[in-house]
Image (cartoon, helix red, strand yellow):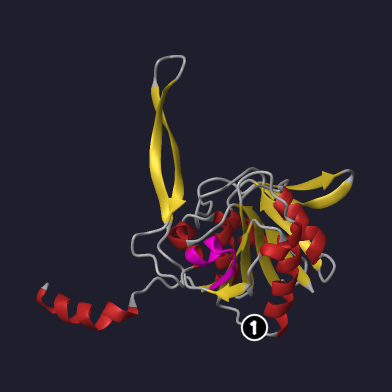
Amino acid sequence: MRFLLTNDDGIYARGLSALYQELSKDADCLIVAPEVEQSAVGHAITLFRPLMVRRVKKDGVFLGYAVKGTPADCVKIGIRELSERPVDLVVSGINLGANVGINVIYSGTVSAATEGVIMGVPSMAISLDIHRDADFSFAARFARKIAAFMLNNYPIPHIALNVNIPALPEEEIKGVVVAKQGRARLIENFEKRTDPRENIYYWLAGETQLSDHEEVDSDACALRKGMITITPIYYDLTRYDVLDDLRERVKDVF
């Protein structure tokens, strides 16, 4: 089997390394990841400059391909050009920080998995709910289980799985739940600063907060309760529930 591994934290990220070490037990894993961190770039792709790719070694051993582009770029070029044989599974992660709620739209990690399913390959994104001092060992082991599950029990090519793992000791994790995407989002604040030439600039900060209308079966709520969350996601953004009503209303527009 051939797995394509990527992320948005960059090719040297510890989460990606942990993922490679674990998934390599079951498959031939090819790393194609951004040269530098690409967090929160969403589903951007590179159009107006060359997509530079270089072979990367670590301790004298081939590590993978570093791409001067986005996570979606990495999946596209990894599947089309860099893998010498068909890719059976795309795995994106392990991200430093959860990807739940509305924040999924901004996530480069999730967008890489979404790009995989656009290209017809079963895909998953996996994230750990912590931003520093992370221990990726359990998350990597769980990723291996989900990878086997997807290939053996859930081989649907056009649905990606978005997996979020609480940053808790394994014995304190309360279980696994299939949860819907909630409404939690980053509540922004901007820190105003002045550079040495007295130019004003702003640094985006903030934290993810639950919506006032957050439902108990959402990904963010379940994750906060110590549950591993699995959310099936899809690239079709159509609101099918309003199509008929909208058709009726636009009749009078022309």
User: In the image, what residue occupies the spot 46% across and 46% down?
Assistant: 207
Question: Is residue 91 inside the magenta stretch?
Answer: no
Quadrant placement of the N terminus: bottom right
> Circle 1 sits on which residue?
154
- The reply, left or right, for residue 66 in relation to residue 180 is right
Which quadrant of the view contains residue 122? bottom right
Closer to the camera, 189 or 152? 189
User: In the image, what residue occupies the spot 45% across and 19% down?
Assistant: 195
Up the image or down, 13 lies above or below 167; here it is above
Closer to the camera, 15 or 41? 15
In the image, which residues are magenta? 221-231
| Residue 33 locus on image (x, y percent) | 68, 53
Q: Is residue 82 visible?
A: no
Question: Is residue 226 inside the magenta stretch?
Answer: yes
| Residue 245 locus on image (x, y percent) | 21, 81
Count of numbered circles in the view: 1
